[in-house]
Amino acid sequence: EVVGVFTQPDKPKGRGYKMIPPPVKAAAVEAGLSVYQPLSLRKGEEAEQAMQTLQELNPDVIVVVAYGQILPKAVLDLPKYGCINVHGSLLPKYRGAGPIQWSIIDGEKTTGVTTMYMGEGLDTGDMILKKETPIGENETYGELHDRLAVIGAQALVETVDLLEQGKAPREKQD
């Protein structure tokens, strides 16, 4: 059961700077889910309100995909099964921003997706699952991104199942 969706605030886009919701919000609203869009989870009154909301929602697990903010320790420690991230590389290689772009720029032949327990650092937590895929010779960032999104969704479902069964592995990163 999805108890809530946290995403970035709507942002102005296009010529008229019309406020456009992030795709995550649009999908969540369409699915009838509650959406929260705090500017920050780390500081200020809005962060305190977001933390209170998270405590009230009392999630068993928090799943993070391309959120764009580092979660504070209080959030990381909240859910029973932890906070899980879906990252667009085969960690520990290509931590941080732009992992898909860097795998192409560096001429990698393969890449993939890693699910991981989130830690306080950027993409430094213990790894759970890795799903590898070849990079096509002329594959663009957009094409690879879209394929990795599907692979990441599949890896996430498998990861949540393993968490629920108490069988999710923990592999330290080098």
Image (cartoon, rainbow, N blue to C red):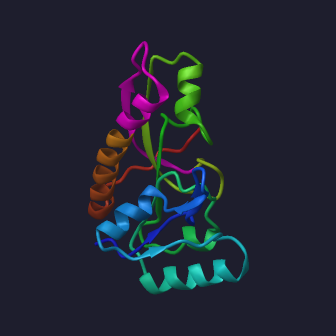
Q: Is residue 135 magenta?
A: yes
Report the quarter where the C terminus lies.
top right
Q: Residue at x 59, y 73 (%)?
A: 38
Report the front residue among 12 and 23: 12
Q: Compared to 19, does 173 lie above or below?
A: above
At x 57%, y 32%, the residue is 93
Residue, far top? 137
Q: Which residue corresponds to the image point at 30% horizontal and 74% vertical from the top-left?
A: 32
> In the current view of this chain or complex, which residue is farthest to the right?
44
The magenta span reads 125-148
Residue 84 spot, x, y in % from top left = 45, 57
**Residue 165: percent from the left, percent from the top?**
26, 61
Question: Above or below — where is 46 with respect to 75?
Answer: below
Q: Quadrant of residue 9?
A: bottom right
Q: Which quarter of the rendering shows the N terminus?
A: bottom left
The spot of residue 166 in percent (x, y) is 31, 61
